[in-house]
Amino acid sequence: MKRMLLALSIAGALAPSLCKAQVMIDMTRITCADYLAMPLDETLNYAAWMSGYYSQKTGKTTVDFDAFATNVDNVKSWCASNPKETVMAGVQRAVDKAK
């Protein structure tokens, strides 16, 4: 029993060192060109994150899926004509205009 407890203790101590490090991404540095080059699933995840971020910033507490789809289309359209701009800058301009 003591050996099993010792083995579990050692395994538990080593387990965190065996985990892979998390990847950190600076969302403010993603350009429109990067955004448009993302695979579809990453594009949707990024758009959902941006939507949640700006909803929190503006105090919006509801989810409107139609508005979300429209916003994603608008951002993609804007990014197509401004590939060197950051997505965050474009969305910030849109939020400022809406105020």
Image: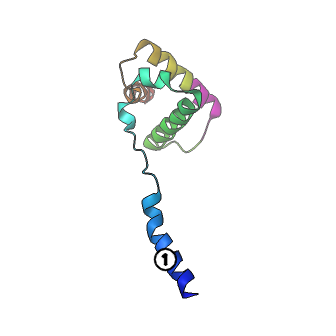
The N terminus, quarter of image = bottom right
- The residue tagged with tag 1: helix, strand or loop? helix
The C terminus, quarter of image = top left
Q: Amino acid at mark 1?
A: Ser
- List x then y, in percent, for residue 51: 51, 36
Q: Residue at x 64, y 29 (%)?
A: 66
- In depth, the one of 36 and 50 nearer the eye is 36
Q: Residue at x 41, y 27 (%)?
A: 87
Question: In the rendered image, which residue does mark 1 sit on?
Answer: 9
On the image, which quarter does residue 43 sit in?
Answer: top right
- List x then y, in percent, for residue 35: 46, 25
Q: Residue furthest bottom?
A: 2
Q: Which span of residues is magenta-colored?
A: 63-71
Look at the image and say whether residue 66 sits in the magenta stretch.
Answer: yes
Tell me the crowding category of disc 1: few under 14, some 14 to 19, or many 20 or more residues within 10 angstroms, Cα based. few
Left or right position of 64 against 94: right
- In depth, the one of 54 and 15 nearer the eye is 15
- List x then y, in percent, for residue 20: 45, 52
Instruction: Establish if 72 lies above or below 77.
Output: below
Look at the image and say whether residue 62 sits in the magenta stretch.
Answer: no
